[in-house]
Amino acid sequence: MIEILDPTDLPRAREAGALVADILQTLKSRTAVGTNLLDIDRWAQSMIAEAGALSCYVDYEPSFGRGPFGHYICTSVNDAVLHGLPHDYTLVDGDLLSLDLAVSAGGVVADSAISFIVGDSNPPESVALISATERALRAGIAAAGPGARIGDISHAIGTVLSSAGYSINTEFGGHGVGSTMHQDPHVSNTGRAGRGYKLRPGLLLALEPWVMADTADLVTDADGWTLRSATGCRTAHSEHTIAITSDGAEILTLPKQARS
């Protein structure tokens, strides 16, 4: 299903996006060497409840997971890249952590992910991975607008990632959002420009470039959820929810300091 929001729904979409962005930034600011992944999950649960919002994850039970997920945020560390199930792990200096959060507020879903390095270390490989996903995300957003096609976004993302030397996995990518978390259209992280669904004002898309340092192959962890690089290499993931408007793409999940 492809859901097109009425223009009167856009303020609620903005509120949902701001909430997700603010929770992620608060979690990042609280996370340090010695933080346990289960602490991050509890913090997310508390902030979602305080906002009167609903988690999109806790009861989520798709075909690709061993559900229900049972937690409020995805916490993916180092070689884990997607759907990281929070567990009893204490972060150490230099860990690469990706946080992925989807929340429903006012009946509209927003979805976003950030990757960052814990502590004072800055391993060059990790810095490069994060930078590539962030640059690819910006390129995908720049390619989105009324009249553009899904393939234009995919091509823009894929060009950045492949130019940075990374192989691209096409099993998981971006997607539509609206009243539910995962909707059509699928937005692959590589593709051909000029192809696919034509973007319309009112469409919400979650764009999410992610990469693994030296492989495009995934393995599923024993927990039935966490997806890891097949070689054990490091990974990174960046995501924003955008709204297609008559003027272009509006980023709904910008951090507070970047919102006008």
Image: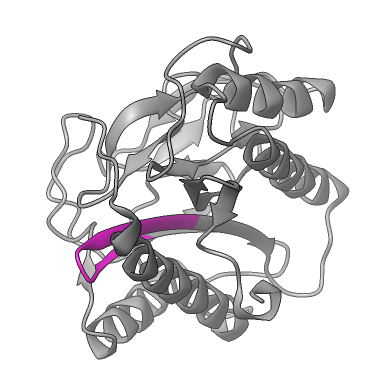
**Which image quarter: residue 153?**
top right
Residue 81, horizontal then vertical, whole percent: 51, 42
Q: Residue furthest right?
A: 124
Q: Is residue 94 magenta?
A: no
Q: Which range is magenta? A: 102-112
Quadrant that contains the C terminus = bottom right
> From what the image shows, is residue 40 above or below residue 189?
below
Give the overall secondary structure of the magenta segment.
strand
Q: Left or right? Give the position of 244 relative to 106.
A: right
Give the total of numbered labels. Answer: 0
Please report the residue visible at 28 percent of the width from the left and 52 percent of the height from the top: 6
Please report the residue visible at 12 percent of the width from the left and 50 percent of the height from the top: 68
Q: Left or right? Give the position of 50 relative to 76.
A: left
- Asked if residue 191 can be seen in this view, the reply is yes
Q: How is the image coloured?
A: one colour
Q: Left or right? Give the position of 193 relative to 163.
A: left
Please report the residue visible at 33 percent of the width from the left and 85 percent of the height from the top: 47
Residue 27, horizontal then vertical, whole percent: 51, 78
**Which image quarter: residue 128?**
top right
Residue 106, horizontal then vertical, whole percent: 22, 71
